[in-house]
Amino acid sequence: MRLFVAVDIAPSVRAELTALINRWKVAEPHARWLRAEGIHVTIKFLGETREELIPEIVRALEVVRSPSPVGIRVRGVGFFPNARRPRVLWAGVEGSPNLAELAQAVESAVEPSGFPCEARTFQPHLTLARLPEGRKWDALVRAGAELAAREFGSYRESEFHLLQSFLKPTGAEYKKLATFAFFKETA
């Protein structure tokens, strides 16, 4: 099973990104565009995981907490590794400080189950498209530069999810296996 931990995006942000993807899909049909319903902020990619580990992972994630909801602002677009050699088109995610703290808490929670901590610094983003090598993406890079500061919306989130990814020729599909409230309001 291919698993990962993620935070959803707000419906208003999803609508903004859907409109953008639908416009750009026409101009760049060779890009592998993500389905808008599948766009999420990945907190931790677990990868291929034995099914019998799921209860252990769920128990580990149930204890992750935050003193407040995570604030998320989606702004601008860019490319990994860079605009000269674009392989991934992404929308930027600016999170409140506790987003990185949440990612670190998730890393620490699942490490004893055999999932090593990520060596790279947590860099939240929303993948919009994967760009196959061997093509020129100049028009997409120019369009992206025009939206480098575009605001797609802000929201607050107080839960994250364990998801299973199904890779299909038509693109990845996702199934939520568990939802975790990392912040709870007290009355």
Image: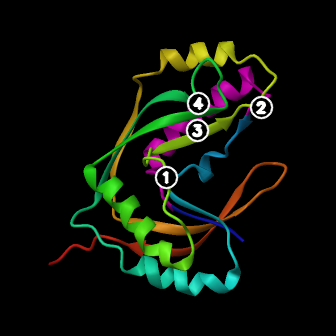
The secondary structure type at the circle numbered 3 is helix
Most extreme residue toward the left is: 187
Mark 4 and 1 residues: CB-CB less than 8 Å, in contact?
no
Q: CA distance from mark 4 to mark 1?
A: 17 Å
Q: Which label was assigned to residue 81?
A: 4
State the CA–CA distance, disc 1 to disc 2. 26 Å
- Going from N to C along the chain, the mark reached first, 3 or 1, is 3
First-in-chain label (1 vs 2): 1
Which amino acid type corresponds to the residue marked 2 in the rendered image? Pro
Start and end of the magenta stretch? 6-31
**Could you tell me if the residues under marks 3 and 4 are in contact, i.e. CB atoms within 8 Å?**
no
Characterize the local packing of mark 4: few (<14), some (14-19) or many (20 or more) Cα atoms within 10 angstroms.
few
User: Which tag, 3 or 4, sits closer to the chain's start?
Assistant: 3
Element type at mark 1: loop
Q: Is residue 14 above or below residue 21?
A: below
Residue at the (52%, 27%) spot, across then down: 78
Contact between labelled residues 1 and 3, with CB atoms less than 8 Å apart: no
Q: Residue at x 67, y 43 (%)?
A: 34
Which x, y percent locates residue 176? 59, 70
In the rendered structure, are the residues bearing label 2 and label 3 in contact, judged by CB atoms less than 8 Å apart?
no
The residue sitting at 67% across, 13% down in the picture is 138
User: Picture coordinates of residue 100 (x, y %)?
Assistant: 35, 53
Q: Position of residue 161 (x, y in %)?
A: 50, 68
Circle 2: element type: loop
Q: How is the image coloured?
A: rainbow
Q: Quadrant of residue 141?
A: top right
The span from disc 3 to disc 1 (Cα, nearest Å) is 32 Å
Query: Is residue 176 left or right of 103 when viewed as pictured?
Result: right
Residue labelled with disc 2 = 132
Instruction: Give the labeled residue for mark 3.
Output: 18
Tell me whether circle 2 and circle 4 mark residues in contact (CB < 8 Å).
no
